[in-house]
Image: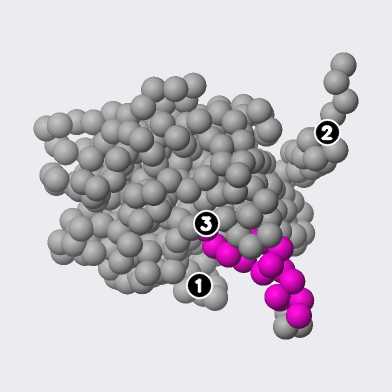
C-alpha cells in the first residue's frame, strides 16, 4: 500500500471532523412549494406557496422565518388545522432581513406536519445577492432571503438557513430563461413555466436572463448558460469538467445530477461587488471571467462544491477560514495539474489574471504593513 501524502491525510481528517459536526436544531423534512412570477421589465418578482415540516420538540412552540425587503408586508399564515398563532414578533438583522417570530398558542404535537402559506411582492429593492433589472435577475439563496427561509440554530447559537426539498415553479415570458442548479427541470411550453425539483435538501438560488444553453457530456453533464455571443460556453464547460474530474481525485465524489455554469453581466458584478459565487451543483461567473479560462479561479470556485456546500462546519467561528483555505488548496492543485509552469508564480506573486492577494508576496506585504 502506498503511503498517504501528508496533505491528503490532513484533508481526510478535516473531512471526517466536519461531517461529524453537522448537527443543527432544525425542522425535520422541510419542504417548499414555491411559485415565482417574474416580470423583469417592470422589476416585479412575485412569490407565493407553502412550506411544511415535521415538528420536533425543539421547535414545537414557535417558528422563525426570515424574509428580505418586500414591496409590502407579506402574507404569512399557518394552515395546519388546530394550530393557532398567539402572536408574530418581528426583528431586523444587520442585512435588512426581517425575522418573523411566529409563536403558537399551544405547543404543536411533535411528529405532526405543520404547514405555512405565504404570498408577497419582493420588488426591485437590491440586497446582498438579490438584484433585478430589465435584463437580469439574481436571487441568491445564500444572500438576502428572497423566499421564506426557515432559520436553524447551530450548536454554538449561530443562525443558519435550513436546507430543504422543494418544487419551484418559475413563470417568465420569452426570451427570459430561469436557471437553478442541482435540480431536475421540467418545462411547460404553453404556460412558460419552468419547474425545478429538489429531491436532495438544498438552499435555492434562482437566476433569470435571456440565456442560451450549451451542454457538454462528461462524468457529470455540464450546462453553460451564456448571455454574450463572445462566450464559448462549450469550451468553458469542457475545461471546467476536466477540473472537476481532477478535484474528484482529491476530495471524493459528488452526488449531483448535473452542473451549471451561469453567466451574469459585468455591470451587475461591479454594482453588487460580487465577483462570482459557488452553489451546490453550479457556479455563477461574470462575463469577463468566462472569456478567458482561468485555472486558479475555476479551481477555487469548483473546490467550494465540497468545502462550503457538501461539507459543512459547526457554527460560524472559523468556518470561512476553513472553507476558503481548502478551496484555495484545491485551486493550487488544479494549477499544478493543468498549468504547472505557473504554479511557482502562483505561490510567489500570484497567478496571472487571478486576485493577487493569494500569494506569498501579498502575505509578506501585509505583515510589513502590520495588517
Q: Secondary structure at mark 3?
A: loop
* Disc on res. 69: none
* As drawn, 355 above or below 163: below
Mark 3 neighbour class, 10 Å CA radius: few under 14, some 14 to 19, many 20 or more: few
Q: Residue at x 76, y 80 (%)?
A: 368
- Magenta stretch? 354-368
Where is residue 298 shown, x and y percent of the image?
51, 46
Cα separation, mark 2 vs mark 1, equals 43 Å
Q: Quadrant of residue 7?
A: top right
Q: If you read the primary sequence from the N terminus, does the residue marked by circle 2 or circle 1 appear first?
A: 2
**N-terminal-most mark, 1 or 3:** 1
Q: Examine the residues drawn in magenta and state their main secondary structure.
A: helix
Q: Residue under label 1, please give it.
A: 95
Mark 1, secondary structure of its residue? loop
Residue 347 higher or lower than 184, as above or below: below
In the image, residue 272 sits, relative to residue 176, either above or below, namely below
Separation (CA) of disc 1 from disc 3: 34 Å
Q: Choose the circle earlier in sequence order: 2 or 3.
A: 2
The residue carrying mark 2 is: 5
Q: Quadrant of the C terminus?
A: bottom right
Q: What is the residue that sits farthest to the bottom in this orientation?
A: 369
Please check the rendered image and state whether residue 359 is part of the magenta-colored stretch, yes or no: yes
Amino acid at each position: 500500500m502506498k503511503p498517504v501524502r501528508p496533505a491528503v491525510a490532513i484533508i481526510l481528517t478535516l473531512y471526517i471532523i466536519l461531517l461529524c459536526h453537522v448537527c443543527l436544531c432544525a425542522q425535520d423534512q422541510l419542504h417548499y412549494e414555491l411559485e415565482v412570477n417574474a416580470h423583469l421589465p417592470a422589476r416585479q418578482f412575485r412569490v407565493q406557496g407553502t412550506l411544511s415540516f415535521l415538528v420536533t420538540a425543539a421547535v414545537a412552540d414557535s417558528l422563525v422565518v426570515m424574509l428580505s425587503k418586500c414591496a409590502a408586508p407579506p402574507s404569512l399564515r399557518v394552515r395546519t388545522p388546530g394550530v393557532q398563532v398567539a402572536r408574530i414578533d418581528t426583528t431586523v438583522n444587520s442585512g435588512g432581513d426581517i425575522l418573523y417570530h411566529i409563536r403558537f398558542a399551544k405547543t404543536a404535537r411533535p411528529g405532526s406536519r405543520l404547514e405555512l402559506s405565504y404570498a408577497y411582492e419582493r420588488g426591485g429593492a437590491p440586497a446582498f445577492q438579490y438584484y433585478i433589472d430589465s435584463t437580469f435577475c439574481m436571487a441568491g439563496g445564500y444572500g438576502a432571503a428572497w423566499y421564506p427561509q426557515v432559520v436553524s440554530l447551530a450548536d454554538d447559537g449561530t443562525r443558519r438557513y435550513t436546507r430543504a426539498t422543494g418544487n419551484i415553479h418559475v413563470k417568465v415570458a420569452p426570451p427570459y430563461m430561469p436557471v437553478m442548479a442541482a435540480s431536475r427541470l421540467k418545462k411547460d411550453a404553453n404556460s412558460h413555466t419552468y419547474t425545478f425539483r429538489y429531491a436532495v435538501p438544498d438552499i435555492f438560488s434562482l437566476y433569470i436572463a435571456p440565456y442560451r444553453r450549451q451542454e457538454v457530456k462528461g462524468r457529470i453533464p455540464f450546462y453553460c448558460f451564456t448571455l454574450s455571443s463572445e462566450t464559448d460556453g462549450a469550451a468553458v464547460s469542457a475545461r471546467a469538467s476536466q477540473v472537476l474530474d481532477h478535484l474528484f481525485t482529491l476530495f471524493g465524489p459528488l452526488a449531483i445530477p448535473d452542473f451549471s455554469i451561469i453567466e451574469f453581466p459585468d455591470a451587475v458584478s461591479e454594482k453588487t461587488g460580487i465577483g462570482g459565487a459557488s452553489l451546490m451543483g453550479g457556479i455563477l461567473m461574470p462575463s469577463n471571467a468566462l472569456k478567458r479560462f482561468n485555472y486558479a479561479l475555476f479551481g477555487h470556485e469548483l473546490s467550494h462544491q465540497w468545502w462550503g456546500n457538501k461539507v459543512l462546519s459547526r457554527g460560524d467561528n472559523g468556518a470561512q477560514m476553513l472553507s476558503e483555505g481548502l478551496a484555495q488548496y484545491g485551486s493550487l492543485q488544479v494549477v499544478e495539474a493543468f498549468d504547472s509552469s505557473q504554479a511557482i508564480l502562483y505561490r510567489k506573486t500570484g497567478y496571472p489574471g487571478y486576485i493577487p492577494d493569494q500569494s506569498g508576496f501579498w502575505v509578506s506585504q501585509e505583515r510589513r504593513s502590520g495588517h
